[in-house]
Structures are given as C-alpha cells and as structure tokens.
Image: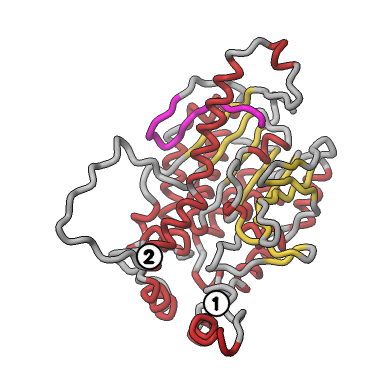
Amino acid sequence: MTDDLIGLVLTGGGARGAYQAGALLAIAEITGARRLPFRALAGSSAGSINVAYLASRALDFGGATRALGDLWCTLRPKDVFRTDTLTLVKTATGWGADLGLGGWIGAGRGKALLDTAPLRELVTRSLDIPAMHAHIERGHVHGLSMAATNYQSGLGVSFFEGAAATLPWSRVTRIGVRARLGVEHVMASAAIPAFFPAVCIDGEWYADGSIRLGTPLSPAIRMGARRILAIAVRHVRPGAAAPVPTLTVPPPYPTAADTAGVVLDALFLDALEADVERTTRINHTLSLLAPEILAQQKTPLVPVSVLVLRPSIDPASLVPAALAHFPAAVRHLFRGLGASDTAGWDLLSYLAFEGVFTTRLMEVGYEDTLARADDIRAFLGGGWPGVSFGVSPSLLEQGAVR
C-alpha cells in the first residue's frame, strides 16, 4: 500500500450509473489528467461497467470519460433489455405459469423479468477487454475489482485482477478471488436480482454484487489504495426526518414497484453510507492508539482518506420526464408493477435506461462535481483536506483498512 495510490469506488444503481459518468467527465476537466488518475478501481453493478470502461482506456482519461458519457447519453431501453412485445409476453407467461401452475407442471420458466441479451452485446462491443488486460499487466491500472453475489454460497465475491502483491481475502460474508476479468464478470456484477438474469461463472451462478457487498470501499483498500474517491448515486436529504402525519384513512397498499424500489434502495444505496460511517469510527479509534500498539495488531490498520460525491437532487425525481419515451410494451410492463408517472419512481430510476433520464442525470453529476473542484484538486493532488460531513453534494471522510 502506497500513499500515492488513489482508488476509485463506483457503487451500483442501474441507470443511476449515468451520474457517475457525469462526475467522471467533470473530474477529467478539473484535473486535466492525461492518464487515468485512479489506479485501484472497484465497481459493483453498473459501477462495474464504468470502471471496466475506464480501465480499458487508462492512457486517455479525458477521451475515456467523454466516450463513456456518450454511451450513457445515447442509451435506450432496447440497448439494455429486449423491449419487443413478443419477448415481454413470453416472459410474463413464464412467470404466470410458475406462480399459477407450478404445482402441476413444474417451475423454472421465469428466470428474470427482463432479457438482457442487448446489454451483453453492448458491453462486448463497447469494452476493449484485451486493452483492459494490457493496462493491468503493464501497471497503468494497479488493480481492478468487480463485485458479484454467489447464489450457491450466498457470499459476496470481489473478482479482482492486478498486481501480484494483492492477495485473495476472506471474511465472514465476502471473499476476494483473483480472476481474468471479462464480459461475464461485468454482466454478473450488473445482474439486478429478479429483473436481470443471473450469470454463470466457472459453474456457479452470480447476481448483482451489491446484494452482499456491505463494505464497498474494502476492495480498493485491499488493492493498495490509501486515498479513495467514491461516487455514490444516493441523494442525502437535508434536515431531520419529517414527522409522520396521523391519518384516519391509510394510504393505498404499497405496489410491487413500491416494494421493489425500497428493496433496491437498500441493496444499492445503504452500503456505502454505512461503510463511510464505519471508516470514520475506525479512523477515530486509530487516532487514540499509540503506534507501538498498532504495530502489534495481526491485521494492521492504517488511515485511508475517502472523498464521496453524491447527487444534489434525488435521481428518482427525474423519472417522470423520461416515461413517455419508453416503448409502449415496456410502459405496459411497468404499469403492471404499479409504476407510473405518479408512483414507483425509485424503482424506475434504476431501470430508466433512456437518454432523456440518463443525460439529465449526467448533467447533475457533472455540475455537482464542478462545484467541488477545489476539494477534488486538493484530494487528487496529494492534499489531505479537512473533514466535512453533511448534506452537500460531496462528503470528505477519513477511513481505515479493514
């Protein structure tokens, strides 16, 4: 682990990954860096697509961020999942047969609500996998990690490729496995449970890495980062929670879209918040211990600085403007789940792979990051800025290896 090795952590969030693309574009402009300034890259879900893209173009950071932005801006639902009526009807029929007739005819027809064959084609076409391997082998990228969840063991698995000094790791619910990363790892990491199909790697089935990745900062730290920039996709609402009104008539029962939105929020958004809080506590504890005591620990702990960028607005609020642009069959599917222009926005913010939504979210990421230009220059340039924790678009914390 070296003081000058900077890590990048991109969490999951489906279509919300567009925010990260906008933030990265601004970082490239702020720094003017020709090469990728982040040498330890860790992603989960949509974040894995973004870090893989950066790793494949490590020698042209500006060009990589512009191309990544173009990719997100031009996305359409058909680029991510099949939107034709026949495919959607077949999927719905399979699920209906499993749920209604499975006791008589057997189950297993409904594997996922959406067929992501187009996403696989897009990832295969857009990522230069040989170049990605070459940049890792030549040390331009010190380490690259993609998180997935193993359906058989229930473990969170961080597949990583990089320097020989990075060793596999094992914790109670998560492990790090050295692998030759490729399209299958990207697809597995991005396989949103229930909506996207699981992916088979080496005879085992994997889904979205955010399911069991409770410590999203850990892979970057394991790969040697002492400073980490993390780009989240959650808006932190200011102030205390509003009091719950007393209602004489209860609101409508939560729809499937409401339930799914809450579940996906928990999977994608809460882990980074908890990990940042945890690293803050660990770092405070370290500051109270004498160096000789720390040196005696079997698992050495060292300070790690973390800068977290967050959306200044709730991405879900951008959903209504994009709904009319979805194919009719897709809108019909979403309405069946209870999502519309008045409800289910949280769920749709993960599935709104539509240029109207992703472009605006990219703009928010770009604007939020430019607003923190001074902090970013200091952070990436080697400074250790003071701590600020609040509801601003970015938060600066102190962390520790664990």
Q: How crowded is mark 1: few (under 14 residues within 10 Å), some or many (20 or more)?
A: some
For the residues carrying marks 1 and 2, which lies nearer the camera in this image?
Answer: 1
Outermost residue on the front side: it is 103
Location of the N terminus (image quadrant): top right
Identify the magenta region.
388-402
Indicate the amino acid at tag 2. Ala
- Name the residue tied to disc 1: 82
Outermost residue on the left side: it is 248
Kindly identify the residue that appears in the image at 40 percent across and 79 percent down.
328
Image coordinates for residue 377, horizontal then vertical, percent: 54, 28
- Name the residue tied to disc 2: 322
Q: Which mark is residue 256?
A: none
Residue 381 in view, yes or no:
yes
Residue 240 image-quadrant placement: top left
Residue 52 in view, yes or no:
no
Query: Is 298 left or right of 288, judged from the image as shown?
Result: right
Q: Earlier in the sequence, mark 1 or mark 2?
A: 1
299 falls in the magenta region: no
Indicate the amino acid at tag 1. Arg
